[in-house]
Amino acid sequence: MKVRAPRWLSVTAVILGSIAAGFFVSTYAPLVWDDPALHGHSQWLVWKFGLIDEAPMPSDNGKWTGPLWALVLGVATELIFPWLKDPYLVRHALTWALWPLTLIATYLLLQKCGIKKSTAFLAVAFLFGIIRFGGHALVSPRDFTHAAGFLLVTLALFVLLKNQKALARPGYLLLLGAISVIPFLLRPPDVLHVIILLFVLGEIAFGSKLQTQKKWRMPLIAIIGAAAFTIVISPVLWEQGFASLFHPFQIFSRFPVVIGQRAFGMAFRSDAVPLWYPFAVIPLISHPVVFLLTIPGLTAFLLLRSPEGGKKAKKGTLEITLKQWTLAIIVLSFAAILILRPHLYDEERHILFLYPLLFLAAALGFDRLRDHLKIGLALVIIAVSLISYGSWGRYAYAYKSPLIGSRNPDRFMGEYRAACLPEAVDALQGRVSANVPVVIFEHGPRSNAYIQEQRRSTSLIARTPHVEMHRFLEASLRRPYAALVHHGLNRFPEVVKDIEAGRAELLWKNTMPPGDIACVIALYR
């Protein structure tokens, strides 16, 4: 007789294992451009809940950063792991831990949707093959968590809505409303799931024989659940009132800063991103094997019956297929971006949420294959994707598939997250004397350089003995000085030209595939 471990023990082991892996992967991981601001926002949230005595004040727009995961990270850094003396390591480790947990949860939710285990495994492999999706897990606590949450909420709502008998229970409707608003709480103003949920509940209620007054009960209770969860978790609403809820929509459509962008060799402004862009990056962000399989997979998904089977819906279940549900979310999410035309900068980072569900749908198109073929295909995808993750490392968020042709650095945004900076700051040790100033032209990377050297002095895990503290300046009028630059969008190419012309001495550089410069340290004597 086999003895099975209790489910709670298995779940706990998986979560703790993912967190441990996150700390291992993130020990020497990036400290990226907006980390200090996001950490300050998390501290502010914890302070607003009365859990710490003081915190930095975010900007007015910064207060509208999604509070849900930010609050989790704030509690982790300020209350659970403060003894590590390295909040940035904690933030990236816990965010990365969501990556394997997202894959596992997708596998389980797909089976709850009625999908075969082999097809669910193939779908997870397709997600793994979106190299930039996995890459952002290491460097983007906002963008990755929103994309992962968007995917999981889509599947979870479908599972819950299929149990139509439970929709008569107020508590169940409150839960549905709370779950539907999770994408908004991860990244405002994403309310797509709330709108779709209310539409579906309205269809169910007004298609029933209930009295007119009772028909409004279903969507109304769901709205209460969504609103209550939003108010409880959003201190900015406590300050500014519920009427301010439209502010993130204004930020989304009228972002106050215009940023230059480059893609496929073309330059444009962040407020004038071409309509073709969300589609053009699909082959860019995924492994070639996955993209080439996506084309027949999506075709089959569109033409064949829904993969959970063609049986008639049982009495008391929602008469909607996973195919219909998934297509509705995909079409509406792309339509929202095309119609609203938000400011998009840093390549696909802000629209990352569009793609996991699209690739998952393509994987479901292979449902009719034999189980052993699907498993074999999934293993091949995982193997080749691991090679890409290994070669790109911390730069996997900027992965460029060879299918797009030329991958020259001047055709794209380069290392726009400045993920190379911690390694570059570490490289100053033994190469640049402490009495030689280090020029970093931009404020964000300059602040992160200070933080990185402090981490190496104080972090319990990432501490390095005998760290020399450098002076980081915006400019230096006297020589000698060192210049540290990251090469996103060919920023400060004059430093590279100075090295090539012999006007500066190359002390150190690191590159990302296929040979693009990430960071450079040059000495001007």
Image (tube, rainbow, N blue to C red):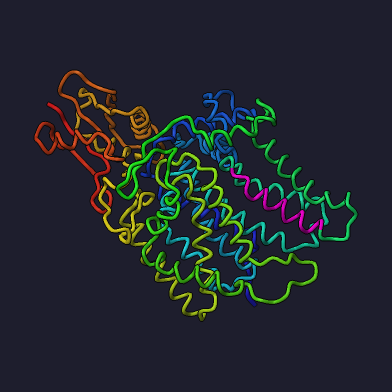
Rendered location of residue 102, percent (x, y): 53, 56
Q: Quadrant of the N terminus?
A: bottom right
Rendered location of residue 410, percent (x, y): 26, 45
Q: Residue at x 53, y 52 (%)?
A: 334
* Extreme residue in the top direction: 477
Q: Residue at x 41, y 51 (%)?
A: 135
* Extreme residue in the right direction: 211
Vertical arrangement, residue 221 with respect to residue 47, above or below: below
Q: Quadrant of the C terminus?
A: top left
Look at the image and give the residue range highlighted in magenta.
Answer: 190-206
Vertical arrangement, residue 109 with respect to residue 27, above or below: below
- For residue 205, say whether it is visible: yes
Rendered location of residue 281, percent (x, y): 40, 54
- For residue 419, say whether it is visible: no
Check if residue 196 falls in the magenta segment: yes
Magenta residues: mostly which secondary structure?
A: helix
